[in-house]
Image: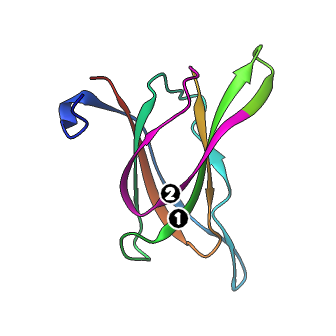
Amino acid sequence: MDITDNSKWVLRYIQSFNSDTFGAINTGIPKFDTSPVTFGSRLIKIKCTSTQVTANQYVGSILQKISLNNSEIVTVDYRSIYLGSQVFQMVDFEPYFIEVNVRKALKQLTISMSEYTG
């Protein structure tokens, strides 16, 4: 397994977010998830960038979610995410989607998620 080979990763999700404001108050980037995009690989690569802060700063958290019987949503894993690129080995459930909770102080975020196919 060569996780450094970019040809073995498929981009599944990319989105940019800006925080909401209420007057002069920053209300943060609301939590979001990747649905209807789901993942089937245990390995995912998450890349976070921001125009606001430098590399390696704490962004927030991701939660691996699965649907039981197409109705009940269950969290099966939780990880912290930072600016830059990170590879995570997720719990062996498929398909799953990712929920992202961004720290309130972060005003801008671009996030991409790729799935390992190698």
Disc on the earlier residue, 1 or 2: 1
Of 54 and 92, nearer the camera is 92
Count neighbours of disc 1 (C-alpha within 10 A) and say few if under 14, some if 14 to 19, many if 20 or more. Answer: many
Q: Main secondary structure of the magenta part?
A: strand
In terms of depth relative to the viewer, which is nearer, 32 or 22? 32
Labels 1 & 2 near each other (Cβ < 8 A): yes
Specify the quadrant that holds the C terminus: top left
Relative side of 117 to 106, left or right: left
Q: Is residue 52 left or right of residue 71?
A: left
Q: Helix, strand, or loop for circle 2?
A: strand
Residue bearing the label numbered 2 = 81
| Residue name at image x 75 percent, y 31 percent | 74
Spatial distance from mark 1 to mark 2, Cα to Cα?
6 Å
Percent x, y of residue 29: 63, 63
Q: Could you tell me which residue is drawn at 73 percent across and 82 percent down?
A: 23
Q: What number of labels is visible?
A: 2
Is the residue marked by circle 2 packed among few (<14), some (14-19), or many (20+) residues within 10 Å? Answer: many
Residue corresponding to mark 1:
59
Q: Which residues are magenta?
A: 75-94
Q: How is the image coloured?
A: rainbow
Indicate the secondary structure of the residue bearing disc 1. strand
The quarter of the displayed image where residue 21 is located: bottom right
Residue 31 point in image, percent of width and height: 67, 53
Q: Is residue 118 above or below residue 76?
A: above
Question: In this orientation, which residue lies closer to the viewer: 117 or 16?
Answer: 117
Instruction: Relative to 3, say whether 104 is above or below.
Output: below
Mark drawn on residue 92: none
Give the amino acid at mark 2. Answer: Ile
Find the residue positioned furthest to the bottom: 24
